[in-house]
Image (cartoon, helix red, strand yellow):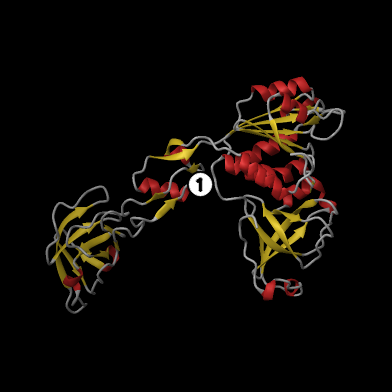
Amino acid sequence: MNGRISLEQAIALLLDAARPATPRPTPLPQALDLASAEDIAADRDVPAQSRSALDGVALRAADTRTASAAAPAKLALRGHVRPSTEPDQPLGPGEACRVLTGAPLPQGADAVAPDEEISRDAETVTLTAPVAEGRGVRLPGSELARGTPIVSRGQAVTPAAASALASLGRAEITAVPPPRALVLAVGNELVSLEEAGRARGPLLVADNLLLLRGLLRESGVRDADARVCPNEPGIIAHALAETEADLVLTTGGTGPGDRDFSLSAATAAGFDPIFRGLALHPAKSTLALRRGRTMLFGLPGTPSAVFAAYHALVLPALLALRGITAPPARTRALLTAPLKGSDRAQRLTPCSLELRDARLLATPLGGASGPRGQMLLAHGLAVTPPGHGPTAGELVEILLLPGRQPETGGSSSESSSRPDHSPEGMSLPVGSGWK
């Protein structure tokens, strides 16, 4: 697509172009954080049988109904059940069985009295108070009931979901394999971190490699090759032609200058453009292309622009490549200071976020913090439309940065003096999804 387009138009094109890998059976430990390709619900109760919730004796509650200090109930002790063993006989009237936490209850038992509330010898248990039916018992399905949804198609397998699946004896699921990534920092002035000793004069360390490798890992990419690439069209094209990665990110060389080769090298390597340039600051020179299933993003060279473009553009496409259906999380927040506007372009502005008095407040970052300082402090990116910038107290759209939780604050004279421009004074909880 020619011409500069909006962020929303770009995302729509990217999601239409993204093609996740074919799902395949995956051992459960390797499926953590991958997208499930199937809807899975519990096919049985966990636990499947009643089990003890504490160390003590299993008994029939009816046998203790009249127990008191003056007239203790005395039960015959029959057997000892551990979590790894099965009861060898049912529990009859007037009988009790020693049990440890997690042990299956003998047939007939409907309560467990804890060790600290009984006295016992080798043959007898004595109780001086009634034990309520169900006390100390984990009933079938009390941890996980049959039919409970565990993970849905298009959801990432969380540790909690994996634990639940393991409790059901599920050894593997059908999941979408994670994409492989290639990151190229394009520039003759760049050296790798390993060669940082040579970074003198005009030479610079290619810190974008660490930035993008870290962001990719944070986003679920386990296999990322990151390296410096000389700014020569033939070398760039060869690297792009040879790659088998599912996602390619290049930094630098996306502008209209005589030495900007990212677009021409990508097309020479067989990639077809998805869009060329955006009405978006600071990512206006971002390119997106596709060859088969492989998606390529040509990102600007400035780290702060790479940071913004990654979260706004690469991340939605990457989630789609991973087979995850939920979009990156967005919410709205109240500005504590005005934002700069732009007549012809949307703007992405790093903001710190604070949850105060049940309201989410966004403070634009800038000034003395500098672009790198803003990256360190940001919890989200404010997405503002073209035109005059919003003022303090207005609601703005916030693209939340993964893994960065807003600060929390309590009631204070400072917070109570802030303008309340939320609709009808209602609080603004953190939400998700593209509006």
**Is 220 on the left-hand or right-hand side of 408?**
left
Q: Is residue 30 above or below residue 414?
A: above
The quarter of the picture where the N terminus appears is top right
Dot 1: few (<14), some (14–19), or many (≥20) neighbours within 10 Å?
many
Position in image of residue 262 (x %, y %): 76, 30
- Using the rendered view, name the quadrant where residue 410 is placed: bottom right
Between 185 and 289, which is closer to the camera in this rendering?
289
Indicate the secondary structure of the residue bearing disc 1. loop
**Is 76 on the left-hand or right-hand side of 242?**
left
Between 9 and 161, which is closer to the camera in this rendering?
9
Position in image of residue 167 (x %, y %): 36, 48
Position in image of residue 368 (x %, y %): 84, 52
- Residue 220 in sight: no
The quarter of the picture where the C terminus appears is bottom right
**Residue indicated by mark 1:** 154
**Is 106 on the left-hand or right-hand side of 325?**
left
Between 222 and 242, which is closer to the camera in this rendering?
242
Outermost residue, bottom side: 70
Which residue corresponds to the image point at 38% horizontal and 56% vertical from the top-left?
148
**How many numbered marks appear?**
1
Residue type at tag 1: Gly
**Is 316 on the left-hand or right-hand side of 267?**
left
- Using the rendered view, name the quadrant where residue 63 is placed: bottom left
Q: Is residue 212 above or below residue 92?
A: above
Which residue corresponds to the image point at 69% horizontal and 23% vertical from the top-left?
239
Which residue corresponds to the image point at 38% horizontal and 45% vertical from the top-left?
166
- Residue 16 in sight: yes
